[in-house]
Amino acid sequence: MTHHYDITSCVQSTLQLALQLHHYDIIVTMQFQNLKPFVSRFWQIKTSFEILTSIPHTIEARIFHTEDNVTYPASVEGSDFFSSAFTLNKRTGRIDDVVIYTVNILLDESQIEETLNTLESKMNFGLYNAQSHREFSKCKSLKPMCSMDMKLHFNLHRGIHGHTNIIFKTSSKLSVIVHGLLVVLQPPLKSFSKKNAVFQRILPSRWTKAKKPMLENVIFGKNFKKKLAADGKSFVIEEKYLQHAYRFLSTLRSCLLLSYDGLYSYFISVSETLPSSCKLELEKLDLKARLSEISDKVMVNLLIAYSVI
């Protein structure tokens, strides 16, 4: 589905996804009874992440954790993630790398939940091996032994929480853990491409970035204009603009609290499987009361900022 946006009626959403590469195993079959050629080589996993839904977005990656004292530690290049180089002990390679993907998406303010609940993305895992870990510095010229895709379906309330095995055609598997949720909703602060990467390559001269709108136009509406009051010192804001601001900010807060509620539910379900000595406490919010409190405070602050009260 293709989305069309008026930048002054949009919000910037930020999703964060944490990917942990856990361990890599050769599945012993008749084809791989002799594991010596595999054990004597170095291995690396390359992960790329992309949003499949046609929607303005940016993706950034950063290393959250990597193995200590390794010869070739994990790294990122753009939105590509390269694992630490590892060797196999018998038929298992231990990896303990975590990458955080930050995804900024431009959303129509009237379709935030609908769009996020239909958001589809994909992670591609490429398997590389080499005689020396130094060869991985030329990973762009190396061809993967094989690669596999994993599709992800986002949900605003549930987020993404999963532990799965990626099965490669080489009779091997990679254990991965993925967590993702909505963390920020705000007026657009970044510039988003109006065209996707394909159009940018074909018609670079026609490729432009959408201008960032004025903050007040996002909150009060695209046609908002301040009117000077009779005293000449303060401003008057029409009721329709105040109503727009209230609805806009209430929508942002309710979506974020819904995301928090989903995280809390997941946390509780995981906590129930842990020994009592390991359990942690997470603040439980009364969502409706908290939403009402936040909305009231925001409206008062807006009115003060624009000298209405």
Image (spheres, rainbow, N blue to C red):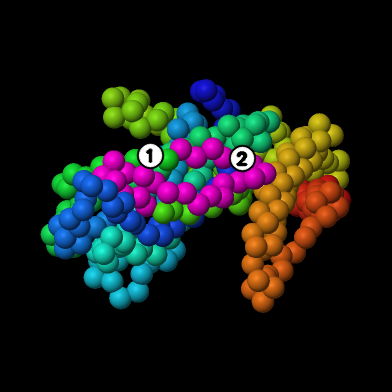
Q: Position of residue 158 (x, y in %)?
A: 64, 45
Residue type, numbered disc 2: Asn
Quickly name the residue at label 1: 149
Residue sitting at the far left: 131
Quickly name the residue at label 2: 155
Main SS of the magenta segment?
strand
Question: Would residue 168 be visible to someone looking at this image?
Answer: yes
The answer to whether mark 1 and mark 2 are in CB contact below 8 A is no
Report the mark closest to the observer, 1 or 2. 1
| Residue found at x 33% / y 28% | 198
Question: Would residue 77 be visible to someone looking at this image?
Answer: no
Residue 156 is one of the magenta-drawn residues: yes
Residue type, numbered disc 1: Asp
Q: Residues within 10 Å of mark 1 (few under 14, many from 20)?
A: some
Q: Quadrant of residue 279?
A: bottom right
| Residue found at x 56% / y 27% | 5
Q: Which residues are magenta?
A: 151-174
Q: How many numbered badges does the structure rendering display?
A: 2
Separation (CA) of disc 1 from disc 2: 20 Å
Q: Position of residue 212 (x, y in %)?
A: 53, 39
Left or right of 308: which side holds 16?
A: left
Residue 56 is one of the magenta-drawn residues: no
Which numbered disc flags the more N-terminal residue, 1 or 2? 1
The residue lying toward the viewer, choosing from 47 and 60, is 47
Q: Residues within 10 Å of mark 2 (few under 14, many from 20)?
A: many
Residue 303, compared with residue 241, is above or below; it is below
Left or right of 3: which side holds 224?
A: right
